Amino acid sequence: MTSPVPNPLLLDIPDRFESERLIIRGPRPGDGTVANVAIRESLAELRPWFPWVTPVPRPEDTEGVYRRAAARWLTREDFLLLLFRKEDGLFVGGSGLHNVEWSVPRMEIGYWLRTSLTGQGYMTEAVRAITAFALEHLRAQRLEIRCEARNTRSAAVAERAGYTLEARLRRQMRGVDGSLQDVLLYAWLADYEQ
């Protein structure tokens, strides 16, 4: 049986790791500009799921979000992750380990992908690498992916990455449009055959 992480601030956590095609890392000053280009490219796909794209964020807004996220990384409150393609450094999308509960430890993976790169397996690859990172470096015992039930693409990523659908939480949240929506809860448990 594992125990909670006594002091997460003392964990030596790399701020960069790789998958086959991706460099995955924490935010750094200047990342807001390249990320904002991808956000603007992807507005049609992001708007149904993410309230933070309305109004359209300016580059300096995105930069501010990423600088605050870098501070939260250092305090071990949240782990925003940026995805870059190895071959040319193109910003691919965003992810992260959020809603961290160190007493378990448990965290939730969120993600979005640049529209021009959808359908190429990048996000499934990223989620698998982030899962391995969380298990090894953050000592996670439980990882979750939550998405609106109508967000079939997000659910497909969770399933392809090997997560188990544990529940459909009925009327769990308000969608961006204000309607009550069901949420699918996927989980990965450490040392458990998925």
Image (cartoon, rainbow, N blue to C red):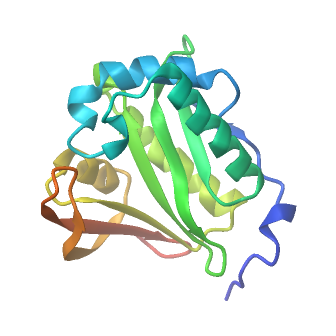
- Horizontally, residue 94 falls left or right of residue 55, namely right
Does 149 appear above or below 2? above
**Of the pair 64 and 96, the residue shown nearer to us:** 64
Q: Is residue 18 visible?
A: no
Which quadrant holds residue 101?
bottom right
Identity of the residue drawn at 62% across and 74% down: 105
Tell me: 124 left or right of 139.
left
Q: Position of residue 155 (x, y in %)?
A: 25, 54
Residue 139 is situated, as x and y percent measured from the top left of the image, at 68, 67
Residue at 40% of width from left, 32% of height from top?
Answer: 122
Residue located at (43% from left, 17% from top): 37
Horizontal relation, residue 113 to residue 86: left or right: left
Please state, as top left, top right, bottom left or bottom right, where the N terminus lies in the image.
Answer: bottom right
Instruction: Pick the residue in front: 42 or 84.
Output: 42
Residue 76 picture location, percent across and down: 72, 59
Q: Is residue 163 above or below residue 30?
A: below
What residue is drawn where x is 58% and y is 74%? 141
Quadrant in which the C terminus is drawn:
bottom left
Q: Is residue 38 above or below residue 76?
A: above
